[in-house]
Amino acid sequence: PETDVDRKFKLSQTIASPIGHVISPFLTKSGTPHQPGQMDTTSTIKLSQGSTGKAIKQRWMPKDALEGLEEYSHCWIVFHFHLNDPESNGKKSKVSPPRGGGTKVGIFASRAPYRPSPIGLSLVEIASVNHDKGELIVKNCDLVHETPVLDIKPYIPDYDKPDDDKEVKVATWLEEKNSKNSEIKGISFTSRADLKIQELFSVTEYDSAETLKSAITKMLMNDPRSIYRKTQLEKGEKNKLFFLNFSNLTVTVWFDGDYAEVLKVEPYYEHKKG
């Protein structure tokens, strides 16, 4: 017979539906930061205002749901990892986090995207709130374009930050530096890439070629490649090209050990590898 716990589990399986989606400069998973704060970018959380034509059903949200959020400096974004292969969610109980250098830990001891319940949490800085359009503009967001948003909660230090007299402990693998989780040591740009940055910065959110180049450099310094991609290269994979898709551009990068060279900068296009 169905128990009370069974009934509660059924309810929890249907209770979460998107209240909006992200308008992000990161157009694909390739190149999207692993964590918030790794890029100087601006994204918009747009509340659902009726049908969007998307396959995922969204909950209609009145614009005044954002009222008062402008009084906070930061907020939590609860979102759905919508680009995951459903067959891969929760398939593995242990994973290798991007900063783990190959270390395997339990899925609940990591922030890996392939989870039993594919839900993520990001802390972002609030830039502004557009009440007329039902939009929340945030800085340094790590979400790919059109990510479904499940909830928005203000960051409140008294509740969210541990007491100053309490020691905050993290896993040793997060503190250790090794060849797989260290930052890229050097970045260069071909003359062709530099010329294209001068030519194309106007189609991006950046106001000059210098700020666009700085953004690309910061993205690469944090090494956006996955552990799997790095491991394949160490095993002899010859294709060292990597594609960053952001801010209406596709950036082609050649990685060689701890160094990266930007080969090309082009208007965004879809490609099979990256």
Image (tube, rainbow, N blue to C red):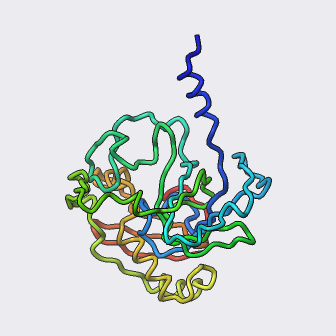
Residue under the point 52% across and 57% down: 29
Q: Nearer the viewer, residue 249 or 41?
A: 41
Q: Nearer the viewer, residue 100 or 165?
A: 165
Is residue 262 positioned above or below 141 on the image? below
Is residue 32 positioned above or below 89 on the image? below
Q: Position of residue 43 (x, y in %)?
A: 58, 69
Is residue 235 positioned above or below 116 on the image? below
Q: Position of residue 208 (x, y in %)?
A: 54, 89
Residue under the point 51% across and 46% down: 119
Residue 201 shows in the view:
yes
**Residue 214 found in image quarter:** bottom left
Residue under the point 71% across and 49% down: 58
Q: Position of residue 186 (x, y in %)?
A: 30, 77
**Residue 256 found in image quarter:** bottom left
Q: Position of residue 109 (x, y in %)?
A: 33, 44
Q: Quadrant of the N terminus?
A: top right
**Residue 131 found in image quarter:** bottom right
Left of 16 or right of it: where is 231? left
Considering every residue shown, the one lying at the far top of the view is 1
Q: Nearer the viewer, residue 139 or 261?
A: 139
Is residue 19 positioned above or below 154 on the image? above
